[in-house]
């Protein structure tokens, strides 16, 4: 892994929410596909004004690192 890629991963550590584009990057999918998953309701988001943010717990639940019932309701 290149130093630039490592630097990009370090900036995500410790955050509670990610933009849809950042979530797509972390999942290894395109930005467009990440937004498609949001539109289909398969990638949960919280809305803050016009921003759509993906909670870290939603990403962990999506990849199976935590059980979905352990995930707090983002509403």
Image (cartoon, rainbow, N blue to C red):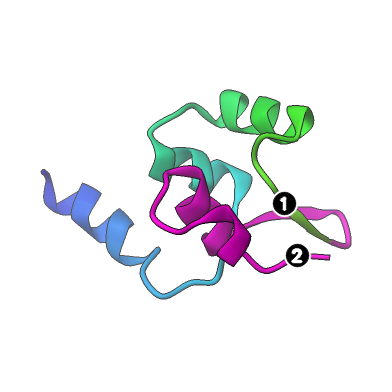
Q: Is residue 49 left or right of residue 73?
A: right
Nearest the viewer among 70 and 33 is: 70
Relative placement, left or right, of 27 versus 8 is right
Residue neighbourhood size for the residue with mark 1, other residues' Cα within 10 Å, grouped as few (<14), some (14–19), many (≥20): many
Mark seen at residue 30: none
SS class, disc 2: loop
Hey, which residue is sitting farthest right in the picture?
Answer: 49
- Looking at the image, which residue is at 30% across and 57% down? 9
Residue on which disc 1 sits:
45
**What residue lies at 41% left-to-right and 75% top-to-bottom?**
14
Quadrant showing the C terminus:
bottom right
Q: Residue, x 20% and y 55% (percent of image)?
A: 6
The foreground one among 16 and 72 is 72
How far from the left and from the top, in percent, is residue 41?
75, 35
- Residues at badges 1 and 2 in contact (C-beta under 8 Å)? yes
* Residue drawn 75% across the image and 65% down it: 73
Locate residue 10, reporting x and y percent.
Answer: 29, 65
Magenta-highlighted residues: 48-75
| Front tag of 1 and 2 | 2
The CA span between labels 1 and 2 is 8 Å
Mark 2, Cα crowd under 10 Å, few <14 / some 14-19 / many 20+, is few
Q: Is residue 51 above or below residue 75?
A: above
The magenta stretch spans residue 65: yes
* Residue on which the image places disc 2: 74
Q: Earlier in the sequence, mark 1 or mark 2?
A: 1
Q: Quadrant of residue 20?
A: top right
Q: Is residue 52 above or below residue 48?
A: above
């Amino acid at each position: 892994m290149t130093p630039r890629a490592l630097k990009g991963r370090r900036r995500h550590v410790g955050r509670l929410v990610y933009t849809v584009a950042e979530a797509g990057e972390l999942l290894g999918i395109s930005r467009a596909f990440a937004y498609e998953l949001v539109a289909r309701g398969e990638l949960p988001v919280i809305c803050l004004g016009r921003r759509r943010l993906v909670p870290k717990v939603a990403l962990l639940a999506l990849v199976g690192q935590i059980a979905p019932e352990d995930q707090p309701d983002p509403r």
